[in-house]
Image: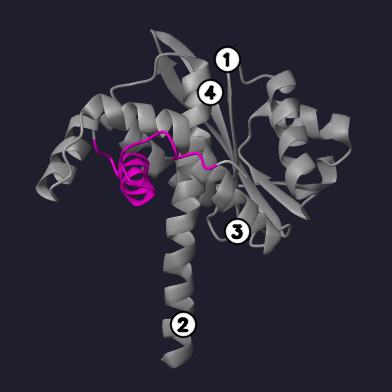
Amino acid sequence: MENPFRCFNSSPEVIRLAVMMYIRYPLSLRQVEDLLFERNIDICHETVRFWWNRFGPMFAAEIRKRRIHHQSYSRWRWHLDEVFVRINGETHYLWRAVDHEGEVLEVFATKRRDRRAALKFLKRSMKRYGRPRKIVTDRLRSYRSAMKVIGIASDQVCGRWLNNRAENSHQPFRRRERAMAKFRDIKTLQKFASVHASIHNHSHGEWLVKERFRSLLA
């Protein structure tokens, strides 16, 4: 397999560190540049931008493949929710599927939140992870209409505060969005949201393992 880092002067460890810092934490490109400079790593902020565009999806794919291989996701209960994102003055929507432990399964950016968009989002999620036993949503009619088309309307659960798991999962992305000063187009939104979800799951999974270990020792 060809080495993806062979044409770069910086080591793979430095590239991975810069990409992970930028995507995982609410830092700007220049803030990542300053933090690396304090560690005697002198690079330009535009280099960080180039690295995350080139290697971010690759790192996210590695994490996603490893988690699916070990069946870290769950088919027990999913939480679905959508959040609006402003791009060049226009409202777009970022759909999110989260399992019962708070790990993001799928993110999908669309211009609308009608039945067609909900149906595409559900098919995309179920193609990758299979059919869950229960799907918790808010009272958006698009979910109900899309589930009737697929034939899983009986699996839907709606209720006040039941979908807090999905709503809370938007918060890390919202903090990251403010640090980036918005997105340029929907393709950039989809790309970054997917990479951010995988890397956030990686950090969340490490925290979850530590908490379970502590509970066993208590």
| Residue 93 marker | 4
- Is residue 61 left or right of 54 when viewed as pictured? right
Give amino acid for label 2.
Phe
Decide which of tag 4 and tag 3 comes sooner along the chain: 4
Give amino acid for label 3.
His
Q: Are marks 4 and 1 in contact (CB under 8 Å)?
A: yes
Give amino acid for label 1.
Lys
Residue at (46, 82) in percent of width and height: 213
* Circle 2 residue: 213
Res. 104 visible in picture: no
Separation (CA) of disc 4 from disc 3: 22 Å
Q: Are marks 2 and 1 in contact (CB under 8 Å)?
A: no
Give amino acid for label 4.
Tyr
What's drawn in magenta, residue-wise? 3-27
Decide which of tag 4 and tag 1 comes sooner along the chain: 4
Residue count near mark 4 (Cα–Cα under 10 Å), binned few <14, some 14–19, many ≥20: many
| Quadrant of residue 138 within the rendered picture | top right
